[in-house]
Image: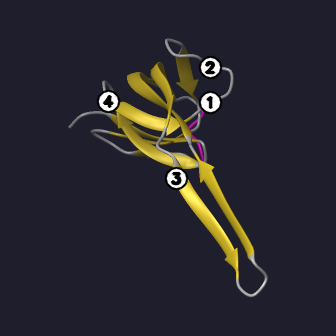
């Protein structure tokens, strides 16, 4: 059984293992090619399972940022009847692709 970890970043949780590529929300001030260390590790599994309360202090997950991009444009529309009020807006979410290098601890 391979070693895996459950990390939290951008108010979301991800189950990751070494060599895996994940898509996460953009982290401020970090460019492509940088190495990031996630310290909010909720659980580590493999042969035995370790759970944090809420985080494991001695475990860190290292990842390398491969790409920084933006997602597709999503359109939204607000409408109020009888008042001629309409509003159309667009949104593009920024994201990063990260490759998990190692799970330490």
**Circle on res. 30:** 2
Name the residue beneath numbered marker 4: 20
- Image location (x, y in percent) of residue 71: 48, 40
Instruction: Answer with mark 4 or mark 3, whichever residue precedes in sequence.
Output: 4
In the image, what residue occupies the spot 44% across and 29% down? 97
Distance, label 1 to label 4, CA atoms, is 19 Å
Name the residue beneath numbered marker 1: 27
Within 10 Å of the Cα at label 3, are there few (<14), some (14-19), or many (20+) other Cα atoms?
Answer: few
Q: Which residues are magenta?
A: 53-57
Name the residue beneath numbered marker 3: 74
- Image location (x, y in percent) of residue 92: 56, 43
Q: Residue furthest bottom?
A: 82
Distance, label 4 to label 3, CA atoms, is 28 Å
Do residues under tags 3 and 1 come within 8 Å of each other at their CB atoms? no
- Asked whether residue 7 appears in the rendered view, the answer is yes
Do residues under tags 2 and 1 come within 8 Å of each other at their CB atoms? yes
Q: Secondary structure at mark 3?
A: strand
Q: Residue furthest left?
A: 1
Instruction: Answer with mark 3 or mark 1, whichever residue precedes in sequence.
Output: 1
Asked whether residue 54 is drawn in magenta, I would say yes
> Which one is nearer the viewer's eye here, 21 or 67?
67
In the image, what residue occupies the spot 32% across and 42% down? 48
Where the N terminus falls, by quadrant? top left
**Front disc: 1 or 4:** 1
> What secondary structure prevails in the magenta region?
loop
- Image location (x, y in percent) of residue 5: 41, 38
């Amino acid at each position: 059984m391979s070693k895996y970890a459950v990390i939290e970043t951008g108010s979301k949780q991800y189950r990751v293992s070494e060599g895996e590529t994940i898509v996460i929300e953009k982290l401020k001030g970090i460019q492509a090619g940088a190495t990031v260390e996630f310290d909010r590790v909720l659980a580590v599994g493999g042969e035995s399972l370790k759970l944090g309360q809420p985080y494991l202090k001695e475990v860190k997950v290292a990842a390398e940022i491969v790409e920084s991009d933006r997602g597709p444009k999503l359109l939204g529309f607000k409408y109020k009847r009888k008042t001629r009020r309409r509003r159309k807006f667009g949104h593009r979410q920024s994201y990063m692709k990260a490759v998990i290098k190692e799970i330490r601890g």
